[in-house]
Amino acid sequence: MDRRPNPIGLHQVRNLAIDSIGVEVADLEGLDGTPIVDVKPLPGPVADT
């Protein structure tokens, strides 16, 4: 098992904007400036919260 000093989080977020230099999301449980390593679509209907 690989040990990391800071574990990778897995969060469902709302996409606010995408452009050529970045992605803006809401509801991310992280500090401002936290890098997003990977983005995957959520299959199926999404509840409006």
Image (spheres, rainbow, N blue to C red):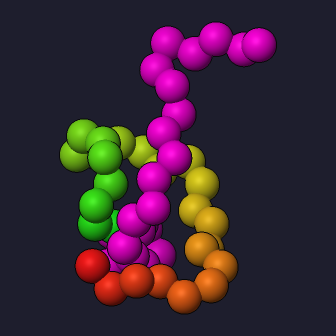
The answer to whether 27 is drawn above or below residue 14 in the figure is: above
Asked whether residue 8 is drawn in magenta, I would say yes
Percent x, y for residue 38? 60, 54
- Say which quarter of the image contains residue 23: bottom left
Q: On the picture, is 20 further left or further right than 34?
A: right
Residue 17 in sight? no
- Quick one: 13 or 45, which is closer to the camera? 45
Q: Residue at x 48, y 39 (%)?
A: 9
The residue range painted magenta reads 1-24
Q: Residue furthest right?
A: 1
Image spot of residue 28 (x, y percent): 32, 54
- Camera-side residue of 24 and 9: 9
Residue 38 appears left or right of 36: right
Q: Residue at x 65, y 79 (%)?
A: 43
Residue sitting at x 63%, y 66%: 40
**Residue 7 inside the magenta-drawn segment:** yes
Vertically, is 2 above or below 18? above
Q: Is residue 47 visible?
A: yes
Residue 36 is left or right of residue 1, and the answer is left
What residue is at 45 percent from the left and 61 percent from the top? 12
Q: Position of residue 41 (x, y in %)?
A: 61, 74
Main secondary-structure element of the magenta-colored stretch:
loop
Instruction: Check the picture and name the quadrant holding the C terminus.
Output: bottom left
Q: Where's residue 20, x and y in %?
A: 47, 76
Which image quarter holds the N terminus? top right
